[in-house]
Image (tube, rainbow, N blue to C red):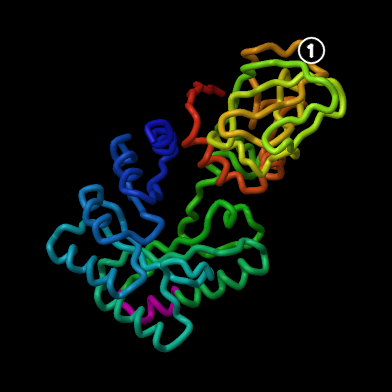
Amino acid sequence: MDRVVPLVMEQDVSTIGIISNAEAKGVRAAGFSGRLLRLRAATPAEREDALALRVEEQVSSQEEALHLRGLFEKGALQAPVHLALNSGGMARDSVELNTTTERQSCQTILETLRSTIGGISTHFASNAASDLTSANIRFQRDVDWVLENSDLSRPETLVHAGSSLTLVSSVPVTTDMYRCGALLYGILKPDWGFCPTMDVEARVVSLQDYPEGTCVGYDHAGQLDRDSRLACISIGYQNGFGRVAVNQSAVAIHDHLVPVIGKVSMNTIIADVTPIRSVAVGDVVTVFGGNGPGAIGPVRAERQFGTIMADLYTHWGTSNDRIYAEVRT
């Protein structure tokens, strides 16, 4: 937080999305005084613990509305709340408006909170063009219904929907604000000039020569088809090098891609470095990032590990030591 928040403040970002109270505290401690918007439902205890942080909470049920109203009437709640709608089809802590009963429930929420509501939101389950087009139409219809059945003023209500994927899609969405995360970390749109904000690196900790036919790793999952020089590398599934990558991944050493063989261990992987005779213990190994022919970018990483970059970033970022680099352009 102490690294990211000053950067977004420099760009005059007025609203930061958080999930946990720990994140909210970190953002405030870094000097941000703007709007803090929680991007999921919260327990009553979480809401109460975040009152001093002026977190703008999400509401999607009558029970939540009653709790928030009680806090407001005590003078403890100083921030507006946001009505979450299921227009995007996520079915995740959001109000459905498809039936009379559901609309009556939403009407109760609106009457309970009245002017305490400062925002209307949804999250899109799919950003495919056809799905997004229909979901956006429904969202606009639902927003209109809320405005028509409440005292809310459209100019004073923050209507927000979508993520980085929504922003970069080909479908224009009517919204006051996109909630962008992936773009900030360079996961998307390199053609727009965005670059990944991290490299993931390990080191060669051992080098050994083995004869043809030697089995490698747990359960003998790998087997050498020639005499080979193998490097033991200081990263494993504990550090975000997923076990799914067995016999289908590569790392870069001296700007050359080399295959990872055998099953991934908790703290180590094994790579075949036979063609690169200059490899030495202590050499840097690139798991993600880099430049030139040995670069491992988002497309390769997602294919190797069978998941999305956001999943990889969160695992890598929380399970590895961080070294911050000053980058000036």
Is residue 216 found inside the magenta-colored segment of the image? Answer: no
Measuring from the top left, give residue 306's x and y in whole percent.
67, 47
Give residue 269's quadrant in the image. Answer: top right
Q: Is residue 106 left or right of residue 69?
A: right
Residue 329, image x and y in percent? 56, 23
Is 227 on the left or on the right of 268, as rendered?
right
Q: Locate the N terminus by quadrant.
A: top left
Q: Can residue 145 be found in the magenta stretch?
A: yes
Spot the residue most to the bottom: 100
Q: How many labels does the image show?
A: 1
Q: Which residue is drawn at 39% across and 77% down?
A: 146
Residue range (magenta): 143-151
Q: At x 66% / y 44%, what residue is drawn?
A: 244
Identify the residue shown where x is 58% and y is 57%.
166
Which amino acid type is shown beneath numbered disc 1? Answer: Arg
Viewer-proximal residue among 50 and 276: 276
Rendered location of residue 75, percent (x, y)? 14, 60
Residue 171 or residue 221, whichever sits in front: 221
- Quick one: SS at disc 1? loop
Q: Mark 1 points at which residue?
A: 277
Seen in the picture, residue 129 relative to 320 is either above or below; the reply is: below
Query: Can you give x and y, in whole percent of width and height, for residue 271 in the image?
Result: 72, 26
Image position of 149 with respect to 160: above or below: below
Asked whether the viewer can see residue 191, the reply is no
Residue at 54%, 64% (x, y): give it: 124
Which class describes the residues within 10 Å of circle 1: few (<14), some (14-19), or many (20+)?
few
In which quarter of the view is residue 65 placed?
bottom left
> What main secondary structure does the magenta stretch of the protein show?
helix
Among the 4 quarters of the image, the one containing residue 256: top right
Q: Is residue 202 visible?
A: yes
